[in-house]
Image (tube, rainbow, N blue to C red):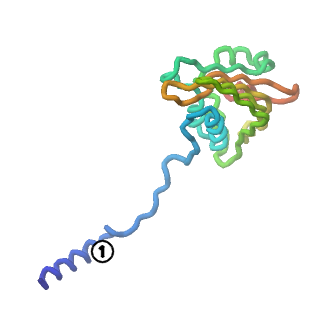
Amino acid sequence: MLKRLKIFLLLFVLISGCGLFDTRDVEPPTDPRSNFTPPTSPDIVIVNLQFAVAEKNLNNYMACFVDTNFSSRKFTYQADVSSQVQYPTIFLFWNLSSEKSYYNTLLSLTNAQSNSHLFLSDEMLSISLDTAIYDADYLLRFEHQRATVAQTLKGKLRFYLAADSRNLWSIHSWFDFKENADDTTWSVLKAIFIN
């Protein structure tokens, strides 16, 4: 019995000396934290879009738009009238690939610690069974590094949203409107950062 106790104590000392029971440091996450919520209603899509802008998260930004793997709808973007005139070829065939390319370029020219916010006001949401229309005034603030491009964008937007085969909502059509002649709209930002 004494021999077994000695062996047990010897094993315990050996095992505890090798660090097997030591606590280890917490590893930093490989992906930045995000505030993306599965969009089970249209209003969640809007909140996800705001967080994607604030967090400068490309994947979450793109997840706000229709996924053609689960929906027959295609993404469309209608720029404000003056942007259509100024950048006619850019907006003629705007699609999800264009949306991703512009946002990726914008992020690459933005410091990770800089501020970016999407403020929405005068919001109106009308929902039917599988479709919703969302109207709002927007003020987008993006502190990018292109000195010749406005960092504050203003206008009105209209989103058409729908539920897909997974019952998840997303934006499939986006209309941008210029309210005041001296405002720079989101369309201008898209046109400049697509190149």
Q: Position of residue 61 (x, y in %)?
A: 60, 34
Residue at 84% in and 26% down? 179
Residue at 62% in and 26% down? 171
Residue at 49% in and 51% down? 29
Whether residue 72 sits left or right of residue 151 in the image: it is left
Instruction: Decide which of 92, 77 is in the foreground and name it.
Output: 77
- Seen from this angle, which residue lies furthest front? 129
Q: Is there any visible trace of residue 23 in the rendered image? A: yes
Q: Position of residue 64 (x, y in %)?
A: 59, 32
In the picture of the structure, the residue carrying the numbered disc 1 is 17
Whether residue 185 sits left or right of residue 90 in the image: it is right
Q: Position of residue 103 (x, y in %)?
A: 63, 32
Q: Quadrant of the C terminus?
A: top right
Mark 1 neighbour density, 10 Å: few (under 14) some (14–19) many (20 or more): few
Give above or below for 127 relative to 6: above
Instruction: Decide which of 78, 148 is in the foreground and name it.
Output: 78
Residue at 59% in and 28% down? 170
- Seen from this angle, which residue lies furthest bottom? 2
Q: Position of residue 90 (x, y in %)?
A: 69, 18
Q: Quadrant of the N terminus?
A: bottom left
Instruction: Decide which of 46, 194 is in the foreground and name it.
Output: 46
Callout 1 amino acid: Gly
Q: Is there any visible trace of residue 149 in the rendered image? A: no
Instruction: Decide which of 117, 136 is in the foreground and name it.
Output: 136
